[in-house]
Amino acid sequence: QEGPVESGGDSVQAGGSLRLSCDASGYPYPRNCMGWFRQAPGKEREGVAFVYTGAGTKYYVDSVKGRFTITQDTTMNTLDLQINSLKSKDTAMYYCAARRAWTCWAPALERDEYEDWGRGAQVTVSS
């Protein structure tokens, strides 16, 4: 394994919760700039939550604030995404992404800013 590897995808009922995990233990580059993206069928891949340790903080897009929580463990081997109050519109393939930069002082919000990606974890929300 060299790139990030996602796990935890599942089919859940609306209103439920899910925790996605990204294993970055085999990633050979700094893990200071990482994020979670998602892609629903027929839609563009969109970023939802990011960590940028240069500033030691996290960033969420408005559509997920209050429901999504991104956490990175102290070893920086895992990057988790807790999703609460799941909605049908959360149905998507979720991807963990990483930049090779040593430091990030701002969240990298665009897909093109990331060099390395996992294969994705499917989240399906049924009502």
Image: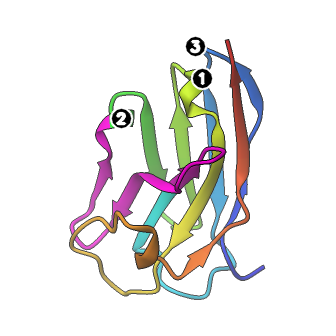
Compare marks 3 and 2 and give the one earlier in the sequence.
3
Left or right of residue 78, residue 5 in this image: right
Give the residue at x 77% y 28%. 11
Q: Is residue 124 above or below residue 106?
A: above
Residue 119, given in percent of the width and then of the height, sits at 73, 64
Which amino acid does the dot numbered 1 rest on? Ser
Which residue is painted at 58% across and 78% down in the image?
116
Task: Answer with left or right where residue 83 lies relative to residue 105.
Answer: right
Task: Pinpoint residue 61: horizontal percent, then vertical percent.
Answer: 32, 45
Q: Which residues are magenta?
A: 37-62
Q: Which residue is mark 3?
A: 15
The quarter of the image holding the N terminus is bottom right
Q: Which residue is label 1 attached to?
A: 88
Q: Secondary structure at mark 1?
A: helix
Q: Secondary structure at mark 3?
A: loop
The alpha-carbon separation of the residues under discs 3 and 2 comes to 16 Å
Quadrant in the picture for residue 17: top right
The residue nearer to you, when weighing 32 against 12, is 12
